[in-house]
Amino acid sequence: MAKQSIKLKKGAQMIVDVLVSEGVDIVWGLTGGAILPVFDALYQNRDKIRLIDTRHEQGAIHMAEGYAKSTGKVGVCVVTSGPGATNIVTGLADAYMDSVPLVAITGQVATSLLGTDGFQEADMVGITRSCTKHNFLVKNIQELPRIMRDAFFIARSGRPGPVLVDIPKDIAASSAEVPIPVHSSIPLSKFVPTPDWDQIPKMAEMIKHAKRPLIYAGGGVINAGASEALRAFARKTNIPVTLTLMGLGAYPATDRQFVDMLGMHGSYRANMALTYCDLLIAIGSRFDDRVTGKISEFAPTSKKIHIDVDPTSISKNVQVDAHVLGDMNAILKELIKRVGTNDYDQWYNELERWNKKHPLAFHQDPQGKVLPQYAIDQIYQITKGDAYITTEVGQHQMWAAQFYKFDKPRRWITSGGLGTMGFGFPAAIGVAFAHPDKTVIDVAGDGSFQMTLQELAVMAEHQLNVKVVILNNKFLGMVKQWQDLFFDKRYASTSIPAQPDFVKLAEAYGIPGYRASTPGQTVQTLEQVLKKKGPCLVEIVVDEEQHVYPMVPAGGANKDMMLSREMEIAQARAEAKVKPITKTGGKK
Amino acid sequence: MRHTISVLVNNQTGVLSRVSNLFSARGYNIDSLVVGITDNPKVSRMTIVVRGDDRIIDQVEKQLNKLVDVIKVVDLTNEDFIARDLALIKVKAEPDTRSHVMDIIQCFNGKIVDVALRSFIIEVTGKESKINAMVELLQNYGIIEMVRTGEVAISRGKKVQEEVEKKVKVKAGKASQSYL
């Protein structure tokens, strides 16, 4: 008997043991009844794992996302059952869309109460089935260690994603003797296909014959840790590179071969290149509707090659001529061996002509209202491109993508697929925990910031080096832009007249707050705060009439970009006659 | 086009809802879905009949393969396969129509499994088209109730099962793994 009791271990301790052996040294969470045993075990192991208490579960999961996106490691959040668990659903959906490796541990009512509508019971496995890569309900303590191990393996393998593990209270609180497996029970081949190497010579041949090739790379390159391989491939072939919103940083934005972001708010040069290329090489990108625009006019004259890890991404939206699935690093390495170089002089001349015709640019009147584009450009200049930038969702997000030039991967942390307002601020906190010596800036809108601002408390408590920069236009700007264009300026629900005094709000949490209303003040304030360590909030009052250009109207062809306000309105009227646009898409 | 897809899955709670959820979330149309255990109690086989163009069927297969509990997906439509549907039909059998109904049953190799004063219950198996034809004829006499299983299918030869055995062996090999 005595011998046995030595080996007995609580379920909660098994969870902590797996976390430690997976290299987890920080988790975010909010406690509650059903998760109490797990928090107790975390508390007892606080020398090994830091536990950060948030003010809302959504904050916890976005922090874990920010951590995961900026490090490539699996982010972990721990919350209680019922409302605690349902509060992380947005974060799970966000992580699922953007392929972020997460393990979310949720408490659950005791197994004897499952299915009885117990207090704080919610069917989390049912609720999250379509927004997780996989999920588990642990019904037997004997399964707990294996499930925890599998959860981490699934989250990080192949195309990463969130995994939820729902743990009934009695499972975490009871004890048993269960060995903890070192490896997952699932083979890696489930998530990483073996490349069809025969495709490589075929692709090399296509590249050899192309006159106007274009690399279109996305977040998959960053997830696969293949940024270096992408650079090597681009350098060797001299092929120009465009990146998706999620791919920014996968290739240096200041490089000669880089032709900006593409898609709905991509540059004129990038979208024209996309339209007129004769070979499109998609790497770790998924032909999202915000990139393709009208499918029938997407890169119409080109052959298409696709390199990815996820079989479902191949020919899902756009039919491709050749594809290879598997480890991107290995595939690119093989491809590099077989390709030569070309100067593509004519092609580069054309790209430069497009760039000169409609560059990504703005004209700040020194006496006028602050342009949001100008504010972002100043952040870029002052930080010399070396900051971690997180964003919320909307106009400010697109301007940050256009005007902050990322040379390194994992510096750009944004909610792309789901378009989650309120993501950026908690994500910035997660990034700051991962990189305490770096500057982290949340480029925020006044609308988005008010969705998760309670986490100011976490920022203050841990004195994180996070700078919240609110570009305040007193509007949900992106939706307003659509209303300007497609709804005759009927600003239904987009004006935000009643706002807190953001400076005082920050001060209420013990955080220094600043306000800038002129271009001069903007530069001065940003210079001042970015010199100092520690948390702060800067509100920049910006011109509310600015629109994000260029813009490909939803469902329109990429080459038919709107490039100026006048052009937008004329075009919108013509469009409206054909097909009224009734939704605001991902830009909430 | 109509495709018959055979899916081998881990015999675990929640697998059926994961599969059916995938179909509803992505807007694929299921004609029928049948689940049953295989000779290996740890593995179940789902036979799914789904309609769609090549692009949709391709996506269905890939999306199914992504599910952690899915072991193997085979589109039987591309192979030589046997498909059967089973129906239990309660049909009116009045004194003056009884013999006509019995003739039809015989033609289709059906069996009468229950006889009541004014009705029969018929059991019939076969291809979907055969059962459809029988149902059409019986409708003239009045079908009171009917239940059908939906299509179950299996490929000729050993191909699919061999694959599973291979996978199970791989898993068995892993059982000897190390522990913390």
Image (cartoon, coloured by chain):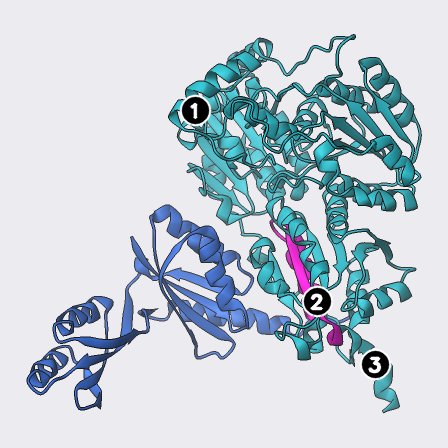
Chain under numbered label 2: A
Where does label 3 land, which residue? A7
Residue A388, how many percent across, how many down? 78, 34
Q: Where's the C terminus of chain A, which quadrant? A: top right
Chain under numbered label 3: A
At 39% from the left and 23% from the top, the residue drawn is: A577
The CA span between labels 2 and 3 is 33 Å
The chain that appears cyan in the image is: A
Q: Which residues are magenta?
A: A146-171
| Amino acid found under the numbered disc labelled 2 | Gln
Q: Secondary structure at mark 2?
A: loop
At 51% from the left and 73% from the top, the residue drawn is: B11
Q: Is residue A331 magenta?
A: no
Mark 3, other Cα within 10 Å: few <14 / some 14–19 / many ≥20: few
Q: Is residue A160 magenta?
A: yes
Residue A120, disc? 2
Mark 2, other Cα within 10 Å: few <14 / some 14–19 / many ≥20: some
Q: Earlier in the sequence, mark 2 or mark 1?
A: 2
Where does label 1 land, which residue? A576
Residue A9 visible at all: yes
Contact between marks 1 and 3 (CB within 8 A): the answer is: no
Q: Earlier in the sequence, mark 2 or mark 3?
A: 3
Q: Quadrant for residue A557, please give it.
A: top left
Chain under numbered label 1: A
The chain that appears blue in the image is: B
Residue A22, how many percent across, how many down? 77, 59
Residue A321, how many percent across, how many down? 42, 36
Q: Earlier in the sequence, mark 1 or mark 3?
A: 3
- Nearest the camera: A57 or A412? A57
Q: Secondary structure at mark 3?
A: helix
Q: Which is more foreground, mark 2 or mark 3?
A: 2
Asked whether, in this view, residue A569 is left or right of residue A135, the answer is: left
